[in-house]
Amino acid sequence: MYNFEQHLHNYSVWTAARAAQRGYASTATIKAAIENSELRQYAENGLSDRESFNAFHRRCANDLIHHLSREVGREATYGRAAKIISIYLKTSVILTNKAGCERSKFIHPPIDRILLRRIAEHTKIRKYQKMNWTRLDEVSYWKLVDELSNLFGKFDWSLEEFWSPERE
């Protein structure tokens, strides 16, 4: 039966796929990877503390990497998987709740070229300008999370103050 939850899932899949595919995989392949992970279940019923979210993020990203790498025939990166997770949850959790739910405080912002360059401009830390989100491995991604958390005192949707669509 088609209901709001299915509709929201479909739209969240589409936004995540469009944001992360960048010539890597089709929307159908990304949808299958999402549906073979815990992402939808987390969006609908996820726990609301940072430690649980971070553990979920690691599991989900590695599930996405495994599925995408197998289906596409070349390695998916943690950065790409993280972008899928972030955009999916931004669409299905943060925006639908107007960032008012507890999970909005720790769901990661989507890391991409625009965000990294704008953070580099703001902080004068040049390494962010040269960073390629599609090449981040798990260690590099979590190091970046820690750095940005320490730098801004947060790591959530509100870091997207440094992102804007016209910067693409």
Image (spheres, grey):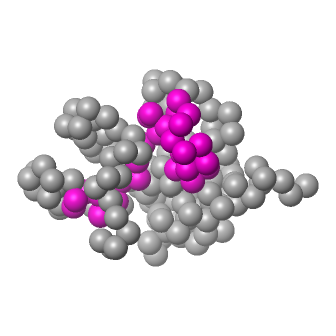
Q: Which corner quadrant of the image does residue 29 belong to?
A: bottom right
Could you say where residue 94 lies in the image, as x and y percent from the top left? Answer: 54, 45
Residue in the picture at 56% in, 34% down: 101
Residue in the picture at 70% in, 55% down: 8
**Residue span colored magenta:** 89-118
For residue 163, side relative to residue 81 (left or right): left
Could you say where residue 82 lies in the image, as x and y percent from the top left? Answer: 44, 49
Q: Establish if 23 lies above or below 123.
A: below
Could you say where residue 44 lies in the image, as x and y percent from the top left? Answer: 69, 39
Placement of the C terminus among the 4 image quadrants: bottom left
Could you say where residue 40 lies in the image, as x and y percent from the top left? Answer: 67, 45
Q: Which is nearer the eye, 115 or 57?
A: 115
For residue 167, side relative to residue 49 (left or right): left
Q: Which corner quadrant of the image does residue 7 belong to?
A: bottom right
Q: Which is nearer the eye, 27 or 76?
A: 27
Q: Establish if 77 lies above or below 142.
A: below
Residue 97: say if magenta: yes
Residue in the picture at 22% in, 59% down: 118
Residue in the picture at 21% in, 53% down: 119
Residue 7: say if magenta: no
